[in-house]
Each structure stands twice: as C-alpha cells, then as structure tokens.
Image (cartoon, rainbow, N blue to C red):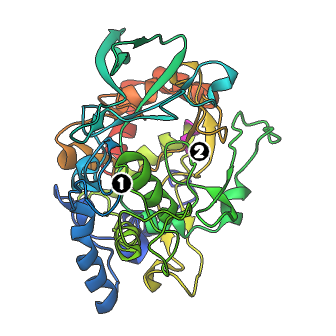
Amino acid sequence: MLGSVFFSPLQAKRLVESMQLAGGSTTIFSRSFAAFELPAEGLTDQELKRHMDTDPLFDRSHIPLNDHKNAGLGPLHNAKSCSACHVLNGRGRAVLGESLFRISLNKDKGDKPVPGMGFQLQDRATFGYEPEASVVREWIEKEKLRKLQTTITTSDGKVLPSDDVARSLRIPPPLIGLGLLEAIPEKDILMNEDINDENNDGISGKAVHTKDENGIDRLGRFGWKATSATLHQQTVDAYNEDMGITTPAGPDTNKTKDGMPADISWEELDGVTYYSQTLAAPATAQKADTQLVRAGFKVFNELKCASCHIAKQQTGFNSDAVAGVINNQTIWPYTDLLVHDMGPELDDGVAEHGLSETFEWRTTPLWGLGLTKRVNHYVGFLHDGRARTIDEAILWHGGEAEESKNQYVSLNSAKKSQLLKWLKQL
C-alpha cells in the first residue's frame, strides 16, 4: 500500500511517479479538454499515421444509402456517428443524442427482449420511418441524490408501464486506454474472480464469459456489464445497435454473417476499431505532490475500494498487437474488469442477454476521472449519469461496496477531502 510506513520517502516518490504514468510508456502528458483525443505515445510512424487516418472515420456522419434496402444509417438508430455519443472521446451526457436506453421485460430476471424492440430502444429514424418510441426523462431528487424516472411512449401512442418493461439509461463511457485494457491477459483477470467470496472479504467479483465476434469463448471486458470481449466486437455492436449499420463478416467479403450486403467496408470497421485501440491514457495531474497522493491512496485502500478498483495491471505480450508499445506495460487503470453486485439502488432490471444479473456492473476504470468536466463540460457518473459529483457516485454504491460506502460516510472531513482530492487528480 502506498500509504504504508514501510515506504521510504524515496520509494514513495518513485511509486508516485510510476502511478502518474497511467498508461505506462504510452501515457500522454496532457490534461486539456482534448486529452482523450490524443494517440498513445510510442506508436511507430506507420502506426501513428494509421491512427490519424482512421480518426475521420470515427467522426463520419452516416446517412441512408441507395445501395440496397435500408442501406446506410438506420432506418432505426440512436446516433449518426461514433463521435455523436463519445464527444471528444469522453463520457457521454444523460441527454438525448448522447445516451441510449437498454430495455427488457421485467419478468424472467430481465433477460427477455421487449417484443418488437429487443434489448435497445431506438428513438430516432430516417425519413419515412417512425422511431420505436420516445422517452420523457425526469430527475427525481431525494436526500441530495437524484434518480431517473422515465415515460416511454411507442410510436402508436402506447405508454409502456415500468412494471412490465425495465429501462436503463446508458451513457457512453470514455474511450481512453482501451487497447491497454484489451491487452490484459485473461488469466490475470481470472486471478481476482471470487464468485463465492471464498476469502471472506465481502467481495465476489465475477468474470463474464461470452463469445467474441468469431464465436470463440472469451472473457467480456468492455461495456457497462462487460458483455464485449474485444474492441472489434464492441465496434460491431455499436454500428449495428446504435446506428443501424450492418458490418462485414470478415476482411475478404462485403457481406454480413447473414449473407446480406454490408453497409460499411471492412476497412472502415477495422479502422474505427484501430482508432479506439490506440488512444492514450492521460497522466495524472503533474502538480499533485507525493504527500497528497500518499494520503488519498491510503484512504482509498483503507476503505477497500482497491478490492474492485485494482490500481495496477500489466499488459501481456502479443506478437500480433495492433501497436507494439501496448505490450508489457505497467498501467494504472483502477479496475478488475469483473462485474460486481452493486446493490438494489443500482439494479436497473436489465440483464444484458443473460450474461450478467440486473444488479451487476463492471468495475469502472478510474483513470482520467478528474478530467471529466474539462472534457465534457458536464459531470455525470455511473451508468446513467445520475451522480453529479464523485461524492454522489460513491454514495450510490451498495451490495459488495456497501461496507466501503458506509465507511466513507463515517470519515472525518480531513480524510474525505484527501480521498476526493486524490481521485480528482487521476
């Protein structure tokens, strides 16, 4: 532990310097509003050129096409481009156009799709079509915390009762350091899995077992419930579900897996994936002094926050890595990439294709946390953006984090300030 008395001042200084390099040698030293848009340090000239060449694909605004039936955007969709949701590659906002709703039938553990809609509500449509539904959002505040209340009305005027249809607002997460998270070996993730809490520490993280885009069994690690195993799979899902755009099955065909013409080329799909894989993670605040980091991180560990938000990870070695610099990096993302029971207050009723329970959420990486407002001009934490401050986000923690939350509430003002200041310098 960084706050341990066993660290000499020199050792503590060196460890703080290591922690500052959130992405190891791929870290960029920028904390400007554009910090999340920068490529990783250490890319070769060729890799950097490809990153810059694929950047416009991420920003491309899609439109309906005449190539084949329903070609191009939509006809049902939530956004027209990747950047429409991931503004400046940062965390989305809980407003129309930068977020979406996952839905399911409330019965059968929330793993049944809504007839005619599936698991995702498309609230936009191209000319000549009707959106599946419209959503009215209202924030209800109680005891200084707020929670979302929604009314979903279908295109034919039917209101979907919340008792029948569960709905979960999902804001896009920030895109920093994704290639590094993808490079953490599966065995390292599984080392922290403890489904039955055999060590009796109250934490029982669970790995999500899914299939990648090729049907191969893999561990999920991306998305609010860790349902995507790879960034390629995540990109395919975003095109299909968020933009209504079909994707090719492989590099040698322009057909989908169903044999239909694909709306975009493999080059574009692969390019957008590559762009997200080679985005940097920013360094922590350069002016943060060793004493502040030691004190705040000590509280973080005392509260057992690090049991799920595991501070340090190591990427593996892959000779086929999209960028060589991603290999063998010591990184500081503060996540175990497992899902955890977060309690009834964060239970959204949607189980994500049966891969996770309605109350389970992947541990959110904390790197770049302190840049949220600078990048987004808005702060909204947790899956639906309900928390307007880091303090509120902590107060919503329950389930496996209930004890840590209660200890946080009981902290004196000095220790609470130390923790929050440390989190804000990430």
Which disc is residue 69 wearing? 1
118 versus 412 height, above or below: below
Closer to the camera: disc 2 or disc 1?
1
Residue 318 percent coordinates (x, y): 58, 82
Residue 137 visible at all: yes
What amino acid type is highlighted by mark number 1? Answer: Lys
Mark 2 highlights which residue?
308
Mark 1 neighbour class, 10 Å CA radius: few under 14, some 14 to 19, many 20 or more: few
At 54% across and 79% down in the image, what residue appears?
Answer: 328
In the rendered structure, the answer to whether residue 67 lies left or right of residue 209 reads: left
Residue 291 percent coordinates (x, y): 36, 52
| Mark 1 element type | loop
Mark 2 neighbour class, 10 Å CA radius: few under 14, some 14 to 19, many 20 or more: many
Q: Nearer the viewer, residue 317 or 371?
A: 317
Q: Which residues are magenta?
A: 303-307
Residue that sits furthest to the bottom in the current view: 45
In the rendered structure, the answer to whether residue 168 lies left or right of residue 6 reads: left
At 69% across and 37% down in the image, what residue appears?
Answer: 203
